[in-house]
Image: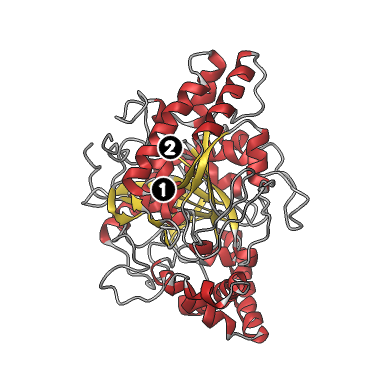
């Protein structure tokens, strides 16, 4: 399929009619699937069979999975089909093929977290993470678990356990990370829904590189258990084909769970309902467009052109778009604070490993865990001070602007198996993700959506950031961009048949 011109969106990713496996079934959104289940037009079993075929193809093409559970998925699909036959679906995602990042607990399977040095043990594995439990209760079909770097520590996806995950648009390029397997699975039709985690951009980075949608919700909006070693930087979020499916998934997973003491109360009215208010409600929305965070970020021209085009589209829809930069502390200060928190988390999550296991870690993870172990409590609290200042400044910023619009990333996907682009002179993944990790520090909702491609056909991501608790507004604005044809890219080529 031909790529969209640089700086312009193409047809929506996964639009019906794309040449994907399963006779088009794998191109349908979760919303479309449940509508057709209700009408009797489609069978959850047939859809699951097509999604499993797509998962196997995705595994061969880009290495997106650590586990594909065909037997379990088909059993769940048969149970779903019977519920739909009786017109008693368990929930809004009943029968929808769904994947889970292998950071989150899933009953019946080990959670390896990308770590080869620690054996999974004999089981049994009897507990679901809160978001996985809500999916299971709502009847989702759980296809398998997707790849992650060790403990989700970096913005690309490769690990000693599973190897390198490639990009659906160019397998020799990175899918991004740390939820790279989930992004690749969604892009290649292995289920329209996936659960990822985001501690510094880990749903938004791979969404931008792989041409899909992802939301990092407000911290606490989706409960997390066990608590992340990276503390309150880590969020659970939906990874989907579009904002409408993300709202659907949020209505399922954004419910309190007693195991997470920091979980927020439910949202009144739900997220899908917020989308029905329509594009016209964008009139007068105050949007700040910051293409480079005040000149601090060098952005690829194709990326800036695509994001600027989408910003103009929001203005044409009636939003008041102003080029303005957020009043954040300088990026070097923010990155230093983020590193103190992140590296401390890396030291904490690996402290139980013996010497041989530590020696087998990804060398980059070994470096940052050693740096984290050298930090003092005062260093950590100084980073918390920077974080609180950033949150206060962004709180004031959102008194003037409803949304912030930036590139998701300053570049498109680079070579796989590397933490940083070759020849860039960079050392750590945080140096090429300046638009993502600041909003983990501030705990704000932030979404990435595809808004075009570069000259080589690689997706470009646009980021929308809202004030804390404004998740529904972020989803509504993103949905408006999709509805207006300003978001979406052509689907990646179907992987070759076996």
Element under disc 1: loop
Q: Residue at x 54, y 24 (%)?
A: 34
Q: Decide: is 287 above or below 419.
A: above
**416 lies left or right of 200:** left
Which mark is on residue 190?
2
**Mark 1 highlights which residue?**
64
Split into 4 quadrants, where in the image is the C terminus? Answer: top left
From the viewer's side, name the closer residue of 52 and 192. 52
Which residue is more in the foreground, 440 or 166? 166
Quadrant hosting residue 342:
bottom right
For image coordinates 61% across by 14% down, the residue present is 85
Is 426 placed above or below 43 here?
A: below
Q: x%, y% of residue 112? A: 55, 56
Residue 18 vs residue 314, the one in the foreground: 18
Dot 2 falls on a residue whose secondary structure is loop
Q: Who's the residue at 41% across and 69% down the image?
A: 429
Question: Residue 243: x and y, percent?
Answer: 50, 40
């Amino acid at each position: 399929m031909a790529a969209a011109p640089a700086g312009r969106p193409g047809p929506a990713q996964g639009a019906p009619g794309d040449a994907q496996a399963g006779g088009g079934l794998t191109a349908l959104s979760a919303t479309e699937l449940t509508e057709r289940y209700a009408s009797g037009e489609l069978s959850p079993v047939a859809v699951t069979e097509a999604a499993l075929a797509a998962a196997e193809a995705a595994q061969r093409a880009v290495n997106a999975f650590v586990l594909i559970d065909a037997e379990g998925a088909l059993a769940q699909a048969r149970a779903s089909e019977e519920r739909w036959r009786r017109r008693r679906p368990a929930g809004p995602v009943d029968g929808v093929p769904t994947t889970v990042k292998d950071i989150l607990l899933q009953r019946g399977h080990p959670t390896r977290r990308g770590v080869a040095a620690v054996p999974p043990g004999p089981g049994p594995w009897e507990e679901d993470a809160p978001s996985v439990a809500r999916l299971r209760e709502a009847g989702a079909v759980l296809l398998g678990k997707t790849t992650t770097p060790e403990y989700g520590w970096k913005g690309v996806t490769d690990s000693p356990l599973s190897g390198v995950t490639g990009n659906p648009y160019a397998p020799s390029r990175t899918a991004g990370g740390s939820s790279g397997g989930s992004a690749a699975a969604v892009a290649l039709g292995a289920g329209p829904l996936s659960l990822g985690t985001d501690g510094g951009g880990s749903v938004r980075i791979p969404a931008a590189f792989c041409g899909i949608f992802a939301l990092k919700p407000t911290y606490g909006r989706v409960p997390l258990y066990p608590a992340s070693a990276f503390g309150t930087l880590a969020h659970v979020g939906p990874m989907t084909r579009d904002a409408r499916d993300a709202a659907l998934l949020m209505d399922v997973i954004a419910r309190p769970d007693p195991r997470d003491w920091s979980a927020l109360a439910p949202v009144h009215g739900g997220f899908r309902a917020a989308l029905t208010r329509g594009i016209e409600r964008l009139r007068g929305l105050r949007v700040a467009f910051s293409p480079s965070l005040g000149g601090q970020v060098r952005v690829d021209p194709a990326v800036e052109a695509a994001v600027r085009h989408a910003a103009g589209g929001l203005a044409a829809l009636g939003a008041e778009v102003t080029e303005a930069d957020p009043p954040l502390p300088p990026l070097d200060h923010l990155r230093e604070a983020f590193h103190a928190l992140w590296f401390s988390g890396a030291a904490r999550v690996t402290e139980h490993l013996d010497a041989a296991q530590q020696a087998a870690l990804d060398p980059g993870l070994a470096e940052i865990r050693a740096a984290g172990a050298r930090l003092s409590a005062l260093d950590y609290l100084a980073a918390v001070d920077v974080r609180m200042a950033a949150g206060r400044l962004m709180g004031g910023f959102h008194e003037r602007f409803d949304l912030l619009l930036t590139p998701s990333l300053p570049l498109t996907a680079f070579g796989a198996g590397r933490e940083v682009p070759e020849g860039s002179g960079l050392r750590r993944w945080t140096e090429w993700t300046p638009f993502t990790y600041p909003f983990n520090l501030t705990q704000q909702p932030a979404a990435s959506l595809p808004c075009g491609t570069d000259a080589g056909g690689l997706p470009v991501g646009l980021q929308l950031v809202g004030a804390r608790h404004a998740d529904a507004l972020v989803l509504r604005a993103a949905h408006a961009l999709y509805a207006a044809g300003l978001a979406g890219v052509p689907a990646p080529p179907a992987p070759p048949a076996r």
